[in-house]
Image: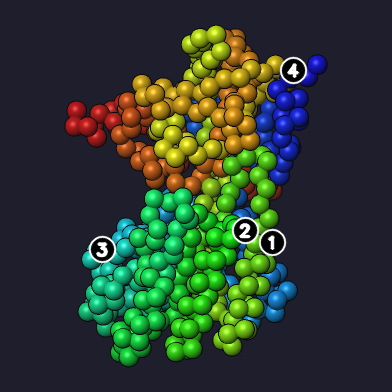
Amino acid sequence: MKIKYSELIDQTLYFPTEEFHVAENKLLFHDIPLMEVVEKFGTPLKISYLPKISQNIQRAKTWFKEAFEKHDYKKSYTYCYCTKSSHFSFVLEEALKNDISIETSSAYDMDIVKSLYEKGKFDQSIEVICNGFKTDDYLEKISDMINHGFENITPILDNYRELDKLTESIDTTFNIGIRIASEEEPKFEFYTSRLGIGYKDIIPYYSQKIAEHPNARLKMLHFFINTGIKDTAYYWNELYKCLRVYARLKKIAPEVDSLNIGGGFPIKTSLNFDYDYPYMVNEIVSQIKKFCEEEGVEEPNIYTEFGSFTVGESGANLYKIVSQKRQNDREKWNMIDSSFMTTLPDAWAISRKFIMLPLNRWEDTYERVFLGGLTCDSDDYYNSEQHTNAIYLPVFSDTKPLYIGFFNTGAYQESISGYGGVHHCLMPQPRHLLITKDEEGNFIYEIFREKQEPQDVLKLLGY
C-alpha cells in the first residue's frame, strides 16, 4: 500500500522537475537546500533566486532567435521587462544584465529609470517604453528625460490628450507609439479594454494629428491582451485585427517600424504545467511574417513586454506549520506562521494558485488539510492546488516540525500587499532573502530586508 507523501507525488504529478527534486527526504528548489535555508534564516521567509531572472530572459531570446532564423524574419526582436511586476532594484539590475529594454506604467517608474541611470546601470541610450494612462506628472517626467538626451524613450499614447501635452513640453523630435484598445474575452465584465485607442480610430487620428506633426514620429503600434498569449481563437483573432491596422498604417506611415505584442507568457502554477513556449513564439513570428507578405508591407520589429515570466519563477515563500485545528469530523486546518493576505494576496483576492510543496518529511504518511493564515479574516486560507481540489501534506505532528513552500511567487505579491507597510491584523512582512551564485556555483545568501518589528508598524500608525 502506498501511503507516503513521496508516493502520492509520484502517482499524481510529473516529478522531479527542472526546478524541484528531493534528496534525503528534503525538497530542493533550483538545487537550493531549502531546509538548510529555513534552519539558518527562520520562517516565514521570502526568497528571491536571482539567476532564474536571467535564465528566463535568455530562454525567450533564444526562442525568438530560432523562429526568426526559421522564417527568414529580417527585423529585430526586443525583450522588455515590465517594471510593475516587481519594482525591486535587485530585479531590475539582474534583468538589465541581459541587454533588455524597460517598460514603465507610472510616473514613479520614471524615477526608477533615473535612479538606475545615476547608478551607472545604463547610459542615456536605454530604450524605455512608457505605457499606461499618463497623468500630468508622468508626462512631465517623460518630457524632461527626452529633453535631457534620453532619445530612446517612447511614450505609448493611451488617449488623444497625451500627444497634446507632450507637444507642449518636448522641444526636440521624439518617437511615439499608439496602444490599440483590444476587445476583451466574452467572459469579461466589459467589452473593450479601457487602455488605448480603438481600432477604427487609429488611422484617422494618425492622418489628422500625427502625419504632419513637426516633432512626433510614430514608430510603434502596441497590442496587449489581458488574458495573455495563448493558443486560442480569441488571441489569434485579436492579433490579426492588430496586424490589419499595422498594414494599413504602414502603407501611409512608412516610419512605423515596430509592433509591440505586449506580454502574457504564463508561468508554472502547477507541476502539471503544459505550455509550449517555442511553438507559440514560432507561430506568432510565422503569422506576422505571412500577413505582412500578403499585404505587401515590410514586417515590423517585434517587441514583447514580459513581467511575470521574467520574475515570477524566481520567488518562493516558506512557512512553518505551527499548529493543527480540527474543526469537525473531516476538516483539519494547518496554521502557517504568517498570513496569506499579507504575503500571497493573489491567493485570496483572485483565487490564484501557486506550486505548494512540503520542504521536509517526504517519506511520512499524508493527510488532507486546509491551510489557514494567522489573521482573523475568513478569507485568509488556501484550500486547493492547481492540479487537484484538495491539499495533501505529511501528517501533522507536535514533535516533528513541518515546513512548506509556495513557489513561483516572485511577481506582484509585494506590490499588491504593500511591501513594508501596514497589513491586515498587523501581520508583519517576513524577512526577505536574496540568493545568487558565485563563480564556482556556490549559493550566496544576502538578507535584503529584515522582518517587520512591532515598533515599525506602530510608528506607521502614529503610536
Tally of marks? 4
The percent coordinates of residue 403 (x first, y second) are 58, 24
Q: Residues within 10 Å of mark 3 (few under 14, many from 20)?
A: few
| Drawn side of residue 424 relative to residue 5, left or right | left
What separation in Å lies between label 4 and label 3 (alpha carbons)? 59 Å
| Drawn side of residue 358 relative to residue 381, left or right | right
The percent coordinates of residue 79 (x first, y second) are 54, 66
> Could you tell me the amino acid type at mark 3?
Thr
Judged from the image, the secondary structure of the residue bearing numbered disc 2 is loop
Residue contact between numbered discs 1 and 4, judged by CB atoms under 8 Å: no
- What residue does disc 1 label? 279
- What residue does disc 2 label? 231
**Mark 3 vs mark 2: which is more N-terminal?**
3
Residue contact between numbered discs 3 and 2, judged by CB atoms under 8 Å: no
> Could you tell me the amino acid type at mark 4?
Ile
Question: Does the image show residue 95?
Answer: no
The percent coordinates of residue 6 (x first, y second) are 73, 25
Q: Quadrant of the N terminus?
A: top right
Question: Does the image show residue 78?
Answer: yes
